[in-house]
Image (cartoon, helix red, strand yellow):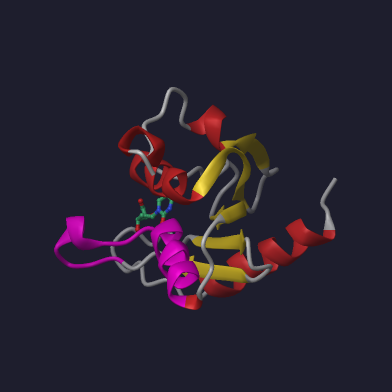
């Protein structure tokens, strides 16, 4: 069952996914964050001819959130091609961890299939976070 919030997040992720710059992989990804300020921030992947310099959609969405004044991720929705859920990569799981509680819901959706809903803790068990450094 999809809530109005998830429909809004899906729409935002899909709208920005259309703008993704992915000439190398051709795998366009969108991410939409519901932040603690009630705003939806979104981002897409931005690849680079020097491959490691590319950004994931989740990284771009986090950058938009911080630039826009949001501080915490309360829910995040990721969309991409295909049937399999497009789950955040390992690096992005850690980036989300910086700004989200472990019980935050992460929805991963390959738009030809069904969305996968899990918590950040399920995606990144036994994780390291800001509290280890006293933050
Ligand atoms: N990608 C994302 O932006 N987010 C994900 O969750 C998975 C992968 C991007 C990185 C790269 O531009 C392309 O998808 C193929 O890996």
What residue occupies the far top of the structure in this picture? 126
Q: What residue is shown at x 37% (from left), y 58% (from top)? A: 56
Residue 135 horizontal side relative to residue 32, left or right: left
- 53 in magenta: yes
Task: Locate the C terminus and report the quarter of the image it occupies.
Answer: top left
Q: What residue is shown at x 22% (from left), y 67% (from top)? A: 48
- 88 in magenta: no
- Looking at the picture, how far across and down is residue 104, in whole percent? 62, 42
Assign the magenta stretch its main secondary structure.
helix
Residue 43 horizontal side relative to residue 4, left or right: left
Q: Quadrant of residue 25?
A: bottom left
Q: What residue is shown at x 53% (from left), y 55% (from top)? A: 80
Foreground residue, 38 or 43?
38
Task: Locate the N terminus and report the quarter of the image it occupies.
Answer: top right
Foreground residue, 135 or 29?
135
Looking at the rendering, the stretch of residues picked out in magenta corresponds to: 47-67
């Amino acid at each position: 069952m999809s809530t109005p919030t998830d429909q809004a997040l899906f729409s935002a992720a899909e709208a920005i996914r259309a703008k993704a710059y992915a000439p190398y992989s051709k795998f366009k990804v969108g991410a939409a964050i519901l932040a603690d300020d009630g705003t939806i921030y979104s981002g897409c992947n931005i690849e680079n001819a020097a491959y490691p310099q590319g950004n994931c959609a989740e990284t771009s969405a986090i950058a938009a959130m911080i630039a826009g004044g949001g501080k915490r991720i309360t829910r995040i929705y990721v969309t991409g091609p295909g049937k399999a859920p497009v789950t955040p990569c390992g690096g992005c799981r850690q980036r989300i961890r910086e700004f989200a509680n472990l019980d935050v819901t992460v929805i991963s959706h390959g738009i030809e299939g069904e969305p996968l809903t899990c918590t950040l803790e399920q995606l990144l068990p036994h994780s390291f976070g800001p509290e280890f450094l006293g933050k």
